[in-house]
Amino acid sequence: MTAAQPTERASAPGKVNLFFAAGPPRPDGYHDVASLYCAVGTGETVTATPTRHTGTTVDVAAVPGSLVAQQIERGTFSLDAVPRDGSNLAVRAARAVLERFPVLPGGLHLRIDKAVPVAGGMGGGSADAAAALTAVNRLAARVSGEPALDDDALLRLAAGLGADVPFALTGGAAVGTGTGARLRPVAVGAPLHLVLVAAEAGLSTPAVYAELDRLRAHRDVAPPRLPAGLEELLGAGAAAELAPLLDNDLQAAALSLAPRLQPVLAAGAAAGALASLVSGSGPTVAHLVADAAAAEDLADVLRGQGAPALAVRAP
């Protein structure tokens, strides 16, 4: 009997930016930001398995009931859009880990169970990368007999993969500064209840930033900072008081590129949401509501209107 191949599985959460301020473009083309990241109760899972063939292969599936599954059901998304080659951030993450271990025989297969919309402003690719870092690290250590990389080493690899990957690795809630990769964990006094709404098509983050710069070309842009009281209200679990402070500098740019998002934002306000905003570079919209029952009710209403919607807790 042939022994079963060892496998390792890890998950990482999607995120919303409850607050996002972006400074002017820097000489290197990036922007300094002040972001309040919050992990949400939907994310990505990566399963890593060694293979007898060289190279890395990728298989992708949709998590039942997820926003991705709803997009597929409505015909607005296909898993064929997810790259299976070295441009996939999970593949890059796997390779970054394997470079730290002695040469392993054969290759690697990654199965990605997707729940977070692609190019949706929720860090789905970053979650893939974070889950791959964890799963492949465990697998490589198990197969090679070498010690696994520690948390600090994984965070360094994460920072080299993208600004949102370190947060996807740690989860919870955190203030991100610099390009967003410099994280400071913050306390959350009580779970927040959100309804996430996926759009028909994704938005390119570089395109949204370029539009932001165009819209602000003749304005003085202040250095980014969080509003006073935001962290304290989050720590107190005061959703109703927190709501007026939620904001996203990228929202105007996302709406300029995708005006169809405006009715989605308005639908939340009409249904009594405490706050509605585009998450990150969009186009996913997040509605903050008072409690779990209100979240399920709003998600039902929006799904009835034909929109992929999901009630989640955060973090």
Image (tube, grey):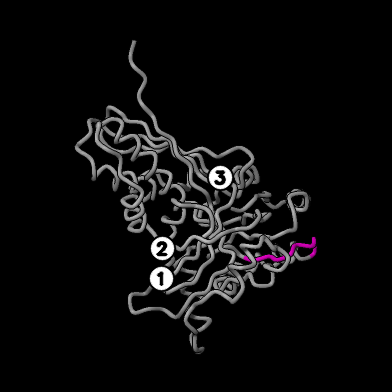
Which numbered marker is on residue 201? none
Q: Residue at x 51, y 88 (%)?
A: 219
Question: Residues under labels 2 and 3: Cα distance?
Answer: 23 Å
Give, as a three-letter code, the residue at label 1.
Gly
Residue found farthest to the top: 1
- Mark 3–mark 1 distance (CA, rounded to whole Å): 28 Å
Q: Is residue 138 left or right of residue 36?
A: left
Label 2 with label 1: CB-CB less than 8 Å: yes
Residue 181 tag number: 2
Quadrant of residue 84 within the rendered picture: top left
Residue drawn at (44%, 47%) of the image: 128
> Tag 2, which secondary structure?
loop
Between residues 117 and 133, which one lies in front from this camera angle?
Answer: 133
**Residue 42 falls within the magenta-colored stretch:** no
Q: Using residue 200 as the reference point, say whether residue 91 is left or right of it.
A: left
Q: Residues within 10 Å of mark 2 (few under 14, many from 20)?
A: many
Magenta-tinted stretch: 270-277
Q: Which residue is mark 3?
A: 115
Amino acid beneath label 3: Ala
Look at the numbered discs 2 and 3 and tell me whether their residues touch, using CB distance below 8 Å: no
x, y percentage for residue 71?
61, 47
- Residue 178: numbered disc: 1
User: Quick one: label 3 or label 1, which is nearer the N terminus?
Assistant: 3
Q: Position of residue 253 (x, y in %)?
A: 56, 73
Report the amino acid beneath label 2.
Ala
